[in-house]
Structures are given as structure tokens and as C-alpha cells.
Image (tube, rainbow, N blue to C red):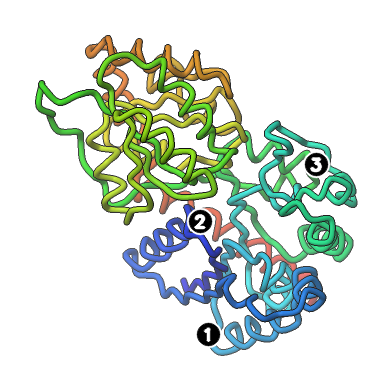
Amino acid sequence: MKVLIVHERYRQPGGEDVVFEDEATLLESRGHAVVRYERHNDELAGTGRLRAAAETVWSRRGVTAVDAVLRRERPDVMHVHNTFPILSPSIFHAAAGRGVATVQTLHNFRLICPQAQLLRGGAICEDCVGKTVAWPAVAHGCYRGSRAASVATAAMLAVHRAAGTWRDAVDRFVALTEFSRDLFVRGGLPADRIDVKPNFVAPDPGPPGSRAANDPPRVAFVGRLSEEKGVRTLLSAWSQVAGKTRLEIVGDGPLRDDVNAAAARDRRIEPVGRAPLAKVLERIAAADLLAMPSVWYETFGRTTVEAFAAGVPVVASRLGAMAELVEDGATGVLVPPGDPAALAAAVNDLLADPERRRRMGAAARADYEARFTADRNYDLLLKVYERALTRRTALAKVAA
């Protein structure tokens, strides 16, 4: 099978980029021909606002560029990870016009929320879910705090809904959790064409090793330093965490100064900054716990699975995808989102009970082996492609 994988990178690297690379490498390792087509948000520099807005809605240049790749490479499947904002969903029509099966991974909530996180003012917001036009996002300027920018994003969603892009030009969608799938169905995507396939971690880091008995306890946080990731909750909780427990904060973002200020007040807090994936995995594997205090739903939470692979329990918010991935009391502990006292109490309780923590780590590792390995993911991904090909072939027969 030949697969064209399309991805538009954001200015700040993130989990979508890792998944794009991992899945491409996975397919190549199984003997498939893979063609990567990448763009980067940096290309927007120097582009006028009106042109950028127009191309966000329907990119003629994107269609022309992708169509040229389709014509030259003749793939069986076009798998898209991100088209925002340069390529636009218009490229699905180019593929459908050439009879190429199409797949869209739903890495965020952009197709049902212009802001992409279902979050407004630090609180969950579903006001635009299911609406033909996402007018609440425009009224509140949800995308980048700008009504003008929100208009362009809301227009993109409305135009492609009207054009039947999701109904006709995308053969299969990939949701990362059942929770996300349910939200997208409520948002109007075809329920019978959304498959649930989680992300995976490869190569397998192997079972956890032993740590020196005199090492101080460590808790790791990995993610963007931003409001939605619950960074303020985490920093507030740390004054209530007992003893010499270290907090290693891996990542960068708009709350960098808050993290540095907290570290200046509390020497147990270590701002690591952005790090290569291999170093991130080392930090997670060396930790006693992973903290994931997000206040938004998350579409997946890859760091949770990275922790599971290393046999590290997770303390996470009882919210969205996190509440689906972490089995409370088995592979970690779930706490109310935005509650520093509850987060600190969960960390203290687990660190005070090494045997319970060991059992949870073993259960987390077993969950990884059952659900989140490369082999398991390959089987699921191939089934998605086969269903997409079956639908596109059936449509071609009807058209003939």
C-alpha cells in the first residue's frame, strides 16, 4: 500500500508532529511506501491578512500543490494530520477527485470549535458544538482573542460543512479516544465513519528499572506551559506537597515566567524547558509520578502513555480523555480539575505508599503493552485504511 501523509506543522512543535513522524516510520517499517508532504505555519510570514483568511477557508494553492503530489505519486490513501491554516480542508476534494481514499486524524477539536480546545476563559465551553455557524466563537473572539481571526476559522468550518467536505470527501476519521469520538459525533461528523485509534509510544522503553533508595521523590510534568495544561494549578499545589519531593517541569510556553518565579521561591521546582523527545522520555522514566492537571478535555494526552510505557503512575484531572486513559486507583489517580489541594493530596498519598505506587506502575505498564504498542497500533491503522479504501471503491463504482 502506498500512503501519502500530509501534515502542516505549527510554529511550536507538539504532539501532532510526533504522531505524524511515528506513524510514517511505522508504515515504512512494515513495508509500505510512504510519501510525506509537509508545510509549516512559518510560511504565513509576509502573507496579508485577507489572503491568509481566504486561504484558511479554501486554499487554491493548497489544492494545486497537493493535487500535483497526488498526480505524481498515485497513492492508495491520503492520510491528513493537520491542514490549518495554510492548506485548508479543500485538499480532501483534490484527493476525492482522483479517487484516492482519505483519512483525517482528529488531533484537536478544530472541526467543532474554532479555538480548537473547547475552552473559554479557563472553563470548558461547548457553545459551538453542533452549530452550523460557530457564531459564539466570533462573538467572543475565541481564536487568538481576535474576532477577525475567529471569523476566518468559523467561516472555514461553515463553508466545508456546506460543501460536504466531511460528508463526502473524507472517507474515515480517526478519533483518539471514545470521549473525543462522542464529541465529534455531537458536532456533526458522520458517526459511522469515525474510528477510535489511540496514539502509541515507540520504540518501547522497556519495563522500569530500579532507582537508588536515597533519591528524593520526583514528579514530572511534560507539556506546554499554558493555562489549559493546568500549570497554575500545579504550581499552587506544590506548596502543599510534603518533604523534598522534586517537581520537574519539561516544556515551554506563555507561562514560562510563572514557572521560573515559582522555582525561585521553591528550590524543589526545576524548570527543564523544552527538550528532545529522548530526554523527555528519560525524565518521565526517572520519575515516581507524572502529573497531568489539564483543565481542558485533551484529545489524548500522549505523555500519559509515555508514562505507562515506563511503568510510571499518572495523577490526572478527572476530565475528558484523561478520565478515559487513567483508571482511577489502578494505573493512577484522578482528581478534580483546577483543584490544587486535591492534586497535592493525591501526590502525597501515592508518594507515602511505595507498594501501592509499585502496583499502579505495573498496571500502567500492562495497559501500555495491551493497548499502546506499535504492533497494536499498526493493526488498528491498517483497518482504518482498509475501510477508507472500501468506501472510496464503492463510491467509484456508483459513479461509474
Question: Is 146 above or below relative to 264?
Answer: below
Residue that mark 2 sits on: 16
**Residue 51 visible:** yes
Horizontal placement of 9 versus 180: left or right?
A: left
Give the mark nearest the N terminus, 2 or 3.
2
Q: CA distance from mark 2 to mark 3?
A: 22 Å
Residue that mark 1 sits on: 73
Question: Residue 380 location in percent, x, y?
Answer: 47, 49
Residue type highlighted by circle 1: Glu
- Residue at figure coordinates x 79%, y 69% from the top left: 57
Give the mark nearest the N terminus, 2 or 1.
2
- Residue at figure coordinates x 27%, y 41% from the top left: 283
Depth check, front residue: 134 or 200: 134
Q: CA distance from mark 2 to mark 1?
A: 24 Å
Quarter location, residue 321: top right
Residue that mark 3 sits on: 129
Depth check, front residue: 319 or 271: 271
Horizontal placement of 150 versus 227: left or right?
A: right
The secondary structure type at the circle numbered 2 is: helix
Question: Is 254 above or below relative to 171?
Answer: above
Question: Residue 188 location in percent, x, y?
Answer: 80, 46
Horizontal placement of 203 versus 71: left or right?
A: left
Question: Is 83 above or below relative to 307?
Answer: below
